[in-house]
């Protein structure tokens, strides 16, 4: 299964056990974006564990409060961030404080997908 959904804030590609979100340049990811995520989860991952992969191709901001609600998604078992910029890597350490799920950063999308598949296979 693989399909791409387009939203005003970016695109989300749905795969069997993970999704890949690419946010648009300059946006701010806000807690109300979780409503969209919850709809995606309900439609595509109902009763099935999954990993959220954010592929940070563009520069944008994240309100850390978004992670409190994201952490409440019971079948979300991991959160991967794909970035290659050192400054952004430092931001990941701050984001980890707000998310109560495993969060790991990667320099390539393939590394993040491999990690997601490992998490799925170990649950």
Image (tube, rainbow, N blue to C red):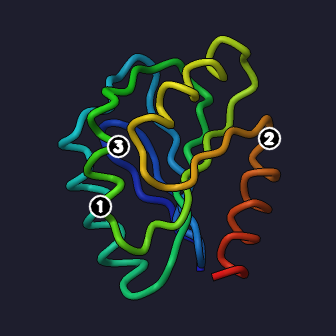
Q: Nearer the viewer's eye, disc 2 or disc 3?
A: 3
Q: Nearer the viewer, residue 81 or 1?
A: 81
Query: Which residue is identified by label 1?
Result: 72
- Looking at the rendered structure, the secondary structure element under dot 2 is loop
Rendered view: 90 above or below 81: above
At horizontal 57% and vertical 54% (from top left) the residue drawn is 102
Rendered view: 81 above or below 122: above
The single residue placed furthest to the top in the displayed view is 87
Mark 3 or mark 1: whose residue is earlier in sequence: 3
Query: Which residue is identified by label 3?
Result: 67
Residue 121: image quadrant is bottom right
Instruction: Tell me whether the residue at label 2 lies in contact with that at label 1, contact meaning CB atoms closer than 8 angstroms.
Output: no
- Looking at the rendered structure, the secondary structure element under dot 1 is loop
Residue 15: image quadrant is bottom right
Q: Is residue 60 left or right of residue 115?
A: left
Q: Position of residue 56 (x, y in %)?
A: 59, 32
- Bin the neighbour count of mark 1 within 10 Å (Cα to Cα): few under 14, some 14-19, many 20 and up: few
Query: Which residue is identified by label 2?
Result: 108
Q: CA distance from mark 2 to mark 3?
A: 22 Å
At horizontal 30% and vertical 76% (from top left) the residue drawn is 42
Q: Nearer the viewer, residue 77 or 107?
A: 77
Q: CA distance from mark 3 to mark 1?
A: 9 Å
- Bin the neighbour count of mark 2 within 10 Å (Cα to Cα): few under 14, some 14-19, many 20 and up: few
């Amino acid at each position: 299964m693989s399909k791409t959904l387009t939203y005003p804030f970016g695109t989300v590609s749905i795969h069997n056990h993970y999704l890949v979100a690419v946010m648009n340049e300059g946006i701010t990811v806000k807690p109300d974006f979780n409503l969209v995520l919850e709809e995606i989860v309900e439609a595509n991952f109902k009763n099935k564990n999954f990993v959220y992969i954010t592929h940070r191709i563009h520069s944008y901001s994240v309100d850390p409060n978004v992670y409190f609600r994201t952490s409440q998604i019971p079948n979300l078992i991991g959160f991967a961030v794909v970035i290659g910029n050192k400054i952004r890597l430092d931001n990941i350490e701050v984001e980890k404080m707000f998310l109560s799920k495993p969060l790991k950063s990667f320099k390539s999308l393939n590394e993040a997908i491999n990690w997601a598949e490992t998490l799925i296979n170990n649950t």
